[in-house]
Structure formats: structure tokens, C-alpha cells
Image (cartoon, grey):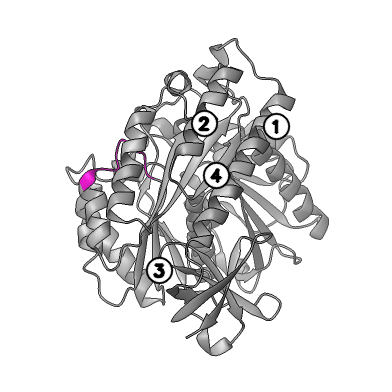
Amino acid sequence: MIDKSVFENKKAAFFTLGCKLNFSETSSIARTMREEGFQKVSFNEKADVYVINTCSVTEIADKKCKQAIKKAIRLNPEAFIVVTGCFAQLKPESISNIEGVDLILGSNEKFDVTSHLGNLSKNTTTEIHRGKILKTEDFKPSYSMGDRTRCFLKIQDGCDYFCSYCTIPLARGRSRSNTIAKTVELAKKAVSEGAHEIILTGVNIGDFGKHQNETFFELIQQLDQIEDIHRFRISSIEPNLLTDEIIEFVAKSKKFMPHFHIPIQSGNNQVLQLMKRRYNRELFADRVKTIKQLMPHAFIGVDVIVGVRGETIDFFNDAHQFLSDLDVSQLHVFTYSERPNTQALKIDDVVPIPERKRRSHVLHQLSEKKLAHFYRSFLGQQANVLLEGAAHNDTMHGFTENYIKVEIPYDKQMANTIKQVQLKSLDLERNVILAELI
């Protein structure tokens, strides 16, 4: 039996890498540790325990994990270092070779951190707890509460899509989720704690409920009926799972915002086949067309990967042209990096690293052009903005219903409120519209 009295008034710091799903899970871990007696502090402060929640989508994420570990050790060489998340699930041995790491927890084990902390004495050898994630059926719900304005609500985990470049199923397991009733209950709890906006997140949220004979569409219908919540947003959803009925529902809803994040990964059909994606670009273009027909003002963000094995220069140029013609608001560009145990490694046609970086730069420039065009089209108009609580050099920012980032002079009284503003001018360097209260 662990004597949890040793946790009283101990300081714990948290560092999160990767997606919004990871942030929601870190928030839940921190909440549990506070309930056990820990005091949460900044990761830049000296702490007794450092918890690093990792990502392993790219090689850069792996490197950032190692940098975070070394930073924690510099801040306090005697601190108890915990590493968890996707990188910990996939490569625990690699992490255990880093001096100073005391505990490694897999994707499921991270939700039970305190039971593995002991008396917080540093271990002579790294302790590893990692289950067989592909066999797990457990779903661990979580939600993040930052400054109480926006909440990331985890509604689904894992993925049944084994895309050729991706390690997510190996890191998080098969697709699974809670029931609609339990998910709505958790959303209501977040609202009771002050959330004005809830972002639905997961690995493949369109798969929600598939094992309970429920659907994502049924879920959003139920969430839409929750009182005292102003906004919902749908985070990344696969184009083949984004149905007409979902789009039509969002168009009519007063709570679900006209904002979509849809991964295309490539604008070339041959590359999509190499990636083993479950759609072609024609279907993707149809989804965008339907959204824009019903919601011309909608923000559409798109995930793209460049430099995957098999992406010839002709394929890239074809994808670039397709994306240029596509009526979307922003591209989220990722440079491909080889991941162990993925099918893509069997493809011989390797894109050189400098060429991958060049292609990434080209698409980043296209994204900047698209975002500026989208923002400019709303200058002079009025919009409702949910203002965040944090101050940034005497200013505060928030987002419109269609996800335009807005900045106004700081006023503490307006934090966590929805205000009507007029969109005045565009700051291209910071991708923000300067606005005035009406």
C-alpha cells in the first residue's frame, strides 16, 4: 500500500507534446494528482515530480521529448521524472537509456500515475509499465480546463485505420469510445466548471460509438441540447466519415461552430493509395464543396504530409495544384519522417530530406496565402468573439465563431466572455485581426 501522505504539498510540473488529445489527457492526469495532494507548478519551475506526456508522430516529437527530459533534470536533478504517452508506449527502452528517467508509463498506464510513484525517491533503474495496447478495450475519458474558456473533450481513442506511414494504432490501440450518455455527462461536468466552448477531440472521432451501435452524428445531436454551453467545435475528422447529415446539422446548429478540420494528407490520388487512405481527392473536394455551399463563411483547416515515400515530384506538383484550387482556409503541413514498424518503409522511392523541406516550405507559403485571403474577406464585418483570459502585452485574444483569431486591448472584466467586435485590420506577421468592441 502506497502512503500517499508523501504527496502532500509536493510540486508537480507537466509538459505535453503533440495533439489536443494529449493536452486533454495531461489535464486529467494533473487533476488527479492535485486531488492526491500535489501542487501544480509551471514546467519552468523547480518541482518534485515532472510528468512528460509524449507524442511520436514525427522524429521531431521524439527529439522534443528528450529535450524536455533534460530540461527537467537541469531544473532539479533530484526530481522524480515520469515519461508517458505515445513515445513511451512505442520506445520505452530508448527512453530508459536517458539518464535521470525514473518511470515510464504506456498509453493506458498514464492515467494511474500516482500508484507508481512510491515515496518519490529516485529509482536506481528506470521502471517501465507498458501494457499490450492493441488488445485493450478500456476507454479513459478526459478533458482539459486551461483558463476555463475552452475545453478539449476526449470522446474517442485509438484507430482501426492502419495507414502506411502512421504509428498511432501501435501507440494507442484500436478505436474505442464511451457511450453517448457518459460523454454527455462529462461535457456537462466541464460546463459546470466554467467551459464556454468545448472542442471534441480524439484520434478518429468519426468512429465514435461504433462498438456500442451509436454514431458520432447521434452524439452531436445530444450535445447540442446541453444548456449553458455557448459553443462546440469538431476537431479533426476523416473526410470519409464527415457525412452530409453532419455538415447539414452543423449548418443549422446555433452551438456547433462553422469550423472544420479535415485531414487530406495528400492532394494526389496515387499518393493517397500509397498511404492506404480510405478516400480519394474527389471525395475530399466534394466535402469541401458541401460545406461551402451551406456555410460560405466556414473555416476549413486541412492536414497535409509532404515528402512521403513514393511522392514523386510530379505527384507533389499535382497535389500542390489541387490544394491551390481547393477552397480551404489553412493548411497544417507536416514533413514526413520514417517511423519504425510502418508499411511505408517497404516503399523504395525515398524523397531526400532537403527536398522534403523544400516541399514543406512551398505548402507553408500556400497556407499563408490562403489564410490571409480568408481573413481579409471578413475585414469590416462584425463578429462574436469568445475572449480568452490571458493577457499578451496589454492585449487579449479570442476566436470568432468561424475561427478567426482576433485581438483587442486587454480588459480583465471581459475575460471568458463573448463580445461583439468589428474586424478592423489584419496583422499578417501574427495571423491575427485587430478589432474594436462594438
Q: Is 365 left or right of 322, judged from the image as shown? A: right
**Which mark is first along the chain, 4 or 3?**
3
Q: Which mark is residue 321?
A: 2
Secondary element at image label 4 = strand
Residue for point 53% across, 20% down: 315
Q: Is residue 388 visible?
A: yes
Name the amino acid type tagged 3. Glu
Q: Is 277 left or right of 39, judged from the image as shown? A: left
Which residue in the structure is indicated by mark 4?
Answer: 332
Which residue sits furthest top? 348
**Which mark is first along the chain, 4 or 2?**
2
Up/down of 183 relative to 306, above or below: below
Please state which of the two labelled residues, at mark 3 or mark 4, is closer to the viewer: 4
Which residue in the structure is indicated by mark 3?
Answer: 197
Residue 42 forms part of the magenta stretch: no
Residue for point 70% across, 31% down: 358
**Which mark is first along the chain, 4 or 1?**
4
Please state which of the two labelled residues, at mark 2 or mark 3, is closer to the viewer: 2
Which residue sits furthest bottom? 413
Report, in whole angstroms, how far the alpha carbon at label 3 lies from the one at label 4.
22 Å
Residue bounds of the magenta highlight: 237-244
Nearer the observer, 380 or 316: 380
What is the quadrant of residue 280 in the picture?
top left
Secondary element at image label 2 = helix
Secondary element at image label 1 = helix
Please state which of the two labelled residues, at mark 1 or mark 3, is closer to the viewer: 1
